Image: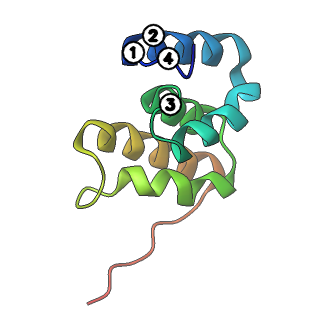
Amino acid sequence: MLADSRAEMRSLASETLRTIQKERFLPTSRIILERGSFGDRIQALFALGAYGIKDDLPLVMRYADFSTADRKLQYWGKQAEISLRKRWAIPVAPLNK
């Protein structure tokens, strides 16, 4: 179901797995974000935000960047980034002047 050609089916399958597996869905979430048409990226970002580790931040940041990320995914990427930074006490780097 994660590889179904219909986005709706991929989304439902991803949501079901995320809900049932919780932390065990993390490896699948990482694969989903690295592949384009496998699973649902929103569910993957949600899972990484909820259960991810420090090392997930660079992957999540690709989807959190307002200027380069897909507009539909940027919100979810930013939420995952905020969650990871709070949980792991990762500071935001200062802006260069």
Of residues 46 and 97, the one nearer the viewer is 46
For the residues carrying marks 2 and 3, which lies nearer the camera in this image? 2
As displayed, is residue 39 above or below residue 68?
A: above
Measured in 3D between alpha carbons, the distance from the residue under mark 3 to the one under mark 1, in whole angstroms, is 20 Å
Relative side of 73 to 4, left or right: left
Residue drawn at point x = 52 percent, y = 30 percent: 38
The C terminus lies in quadrant: bottom left
Q: What secondary structure is found at the residue carrying circle 2? A: helix
Report which residue position mark 1 lands on. Answer: 6
For the residues carrying marks 3 and 1, which lies nearer the camera in this image? 1
Residue drawn at point x = 55 percent, y = 22 percent: 3
Report which residue position mark 4 lands on. Answer: 4
The kind of residue tagged 1 is Arg
The kind of residue tagged 4 is Asp
The kind of residue tagged 3 is Phe
Image quadrant where residue 42 sits? top left
